[in-house]
Image (cartoon, rainbow, N blue to C red):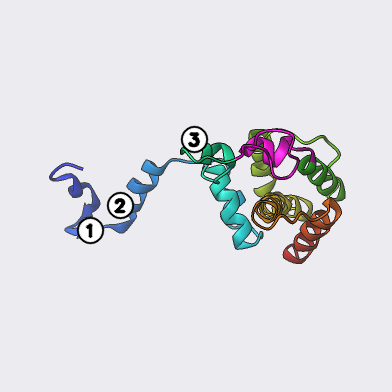
Amino acid sequence: MQAGAFDQFIYAGKFKISKMYKYLHDIGGHVAWKRIICNSKATPKASFIVWLALQKRLPTKDMLRSWGMSISSSCELCQAADESLDHMFFDCSVSKEVWSCVLLQLGVSRSVMQWELEVQWCSVKSRSTKEADIKRSIAFSETVYALWLQRNAKLFKNKLDSVDCIIRRVLFIVACRSQ
């Protein structure tokens, strides 16, 4: 801001916080996925991990390698491909199985899509007040979080839960948080 720019926030000799808020809000722009994070009924930890993923700041192996770290690039969940955000959450055979079962349990009979399409779908669901859509929105965040926890458990503890265990955990949290 240049000298004298603050004059636009003054009305009748008084600084107006509402004018400053509008100015700052307009600078930030709008993101379609904000409802997935804000006012979500998902656990705060899940919302935070999803927020990092949406910002493309989750430290997946492809990102760590781009920073110069000398680590294996293979996915911890399936060991079949390089780990990236898209692969780990929606292309990996383990994550596809988890997503398919979670979606089916929530009355969604479609195949798992790519990250950006799933985010768009969840963004629409997160704006709804219907109970089924609230559950689907919670399930999105909790499934991403559960898969991230599994990835870390395998990477740091060499422990991997069964797909059924992951699904049951996600569905339990969805049931509890949607009450």
Q: Earlier in the sequence, mark 1 or mark 2?
A: 1
Q: Earlier in the sequence, mark 1 or mark 3?
A: 1
Q: Which residue is mark 1?
A: 15
Disc 3, SS: helix
Quarter of the picture containing the N terminus is top left
Any part of residue 138 in sight: yes
Q: Which residue is mark 2?
A: 20
- Residue 48: x, y in percent? 56, 55
**In the image, which disc is placed on residue 66?**
3
> For this view, does 15 lie left or right of residue 95?
left
Pointer 1 and pointer 2: residues touching (CB < 8 Å)?
yes
Quarter of the picture containing the C terminus is bottom right
- Residue 90: x, y in percent? 72, 38
User: 120 or 47, which is in the foreground?
Assistant: 47
Q: Residue drawn 59% across and 53% down?
A: 49
In the image, residue 81 lies in the stretch drawn in magenta = yes
Of labels 1 and 3, the one closer to you = 3
**In the image, which disc is placed on residue 172?**
none
User: 148 or 65, which is in the foreground?
Assistant: 65
- Residue 43: x, y in percent? 64, 62
Inspect the image, locate mark 2, and give the three-letter code of the amino acid beneath it: Met
Inspect the image, locate mark 3, and give the three-letter code of the amino acid beneath it: Ser
**Range shown magenta:** 72-93
Label 1 Cα neighbours within 10 Å, binned few <14 / some 14-19 / many ≥20: some
